Image (cartoon, rainbow, N blue to C red):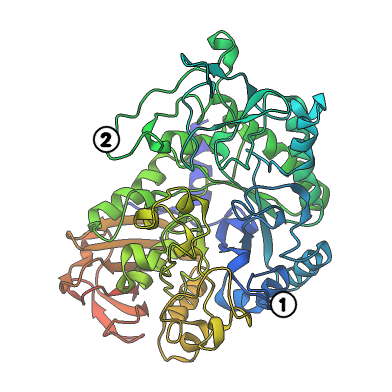
Amino acid sequence: MKEIFIFLAVSTYVILCAGSTIKQENEKPLEWWETTIVYQIYPRSYVDSDGDGIGDIKGITSKLEYIKELGAGAIWLSPIFQSPMYDFGYDIADFYAIHDEFGTMEDFDELLDKANELDIKVVLDLVPNHTSNESVWFQEALNGNEKYYNYFVWEDGVVDENGNLQPPNNWLSHFRGSAWEYREEVGKYYLHQFVVGQPDLNYRNPDVVAEMKDIIRFWLDKGVAGFRVDAVNCLFEVDKELFGGKYPDEPLSGRIDVDPESHDYLNHIYTKDQNETYYMVYEFRDVFDEISAKDGLLRVMMTEVYATIQDVVRYYGEGDIEGAQMPFNFDLITDTSASSSAADIKKAIDKFLTYKPVDKIANWVVGNHDQSRTATRYGTSLVDGINMIVLLLPGVAVTYMGEELGMVDGYVSWEDTVDPAGCNTNDPINYVLKSRDPERTPFQWNAEKNAGFSTADKTWLPIAEGYETLNVEVQKNAARSHFKVYQALADLRQENAFKYGRLDSLALNKDIFAFKRWYMEETYLVIVNMRETEHVVNLTYFENVHGDASVVVRSVQSPKDEGDIFNVSALPVAGYESVVVKLL
């Protein structure tokens, strides 16, 4: 047995003199998603093809060449299903139909066909936690249809000391106020963890589970490459039978910076992260694999969860049971900001890599339609540096539309605010702290009317100021731009050092974060200065790094040129400079 082990080891690895062990042959073939860039599109804000001020599917189809040119291999579309749009598509009335403002099923089929021609995968947004109160399911429930009544979570109210009917308990909505709404038609309250128009589905009902699996099958059978699963940790509430048949109150969070109407006022131990949720995701994965086995295209599941790292990584699976391939990693959103030091960045990156299963792929997310844009949160000087981190760390890179340009949050007045998270504050001053409209302003294509997004006189959200100089056309024509840096990084991702290579990272000082990617004879180093202070750094703190290195990619404000050669023991780094060098 000992001799067999030695033979296998030698046949698979080369043991280097310095002690590093690098796999050099029989590499596992990588699936399409494992090395791709997933480009998130918020359809209402990408391209308006018919002049109504709202982006649509035909608009997206018209710009697929741009996505190909950028270097992304997959697009993820925020919800495009039929919806009354109280929460802009996350309140779905018909999971099997395209929302009329976005187009038709024929438009979507054309999008799929064009994407296939360009070898771009299409991923949709699945919203399984709730539906719309305008859905046939909910309307049938109100009309006394027992089957659909049981699709939702209902509870009797409580009569207070004054004889007034009150909600069943203290549960709060993500959008403020009670998570319960009374309906006279049935004489009960229904649960809505989000807006009033989004009644929660009852996943303790096998009919709901079967329905959702059929929805998944329907779209995957059309050729969709996967789903991003929204708010998945809210799928289950605690089993009320464990509490005498009544849903219990949730404890106070203890936070003194929020008011009693705020979702953050409570600790959501009964409405989030229930154990049954993970196993439902595993069941969903079985459906993904079922369709993949039929046509040979591996389907990918991405899950959206803001939770502890221990809970997030459970979505990968358990033992031999597979879950989501990509439980979204939000650590570079929740744990870091413009004030973060190099050590803070390293800590956030190390956290996810440490907790995820060793045989699973990491992913990196710095923005989305619910978070202030990256260039606003980190500052415009760090646009290229943050993109270097996201695109060159091992795993899947996720880019929210506009991050490749350094788009910033747009100003949206109280009068123009449409996001329920902002509107429900009823606060014309502080609504900006909750509204998600600023990160959803239309994409900036050029310096023409409405930034080339639409020919309409009024767009659904106002165009961000400064679009005349911050847009695709300007950056494509510039000698140096964030767009061109992004393209170069996307190309560099295809090198074996970034597809197969190992990672080491260091906070070289309080300002400079650096990491090393290496494979076989190739070694790259990525250096990101988080501050305006200039430094001279010694990269020989990395093992087996010595001699000279050549500049491969540099940020737009870098004084260096591609091809410049520096000794790694004394690399000058300008303020906010980011650079990728290759060891010679």
The circle drawn on residue 50 is: 1
Residue at x 34%, y 62% (from the top left corner):
377
Circle nearer the N terminus (2, 1): 1
Give amino acid for label 2. Answer: Ile
Q: Helix, strand or loop at disc 1?
A: loop
Between 421 and 466, the residue placed more toward the observer is 421
From the image, tell me which residue sits under label 2: 256
> Is residue 256 toward the left or the right of residue 269 in the image?
left
Residue found at x 41% / y 83%: 481
Residue 117: give x, y in percent of width and height: 76, 73
- Count of numbered tags: 2
The C terminus: image quadrant: bottom left
In the rendered image, the residue lying farthest to the top is: 244
CA neighbours of label 2 inside 10 A, class few (<14), some (14 to 19), many (20+): few
Q: Position of residue 574 (x, y in %)?
A: 21, 77
> On the image, which quarter does residue 18 sit in?
bottom left
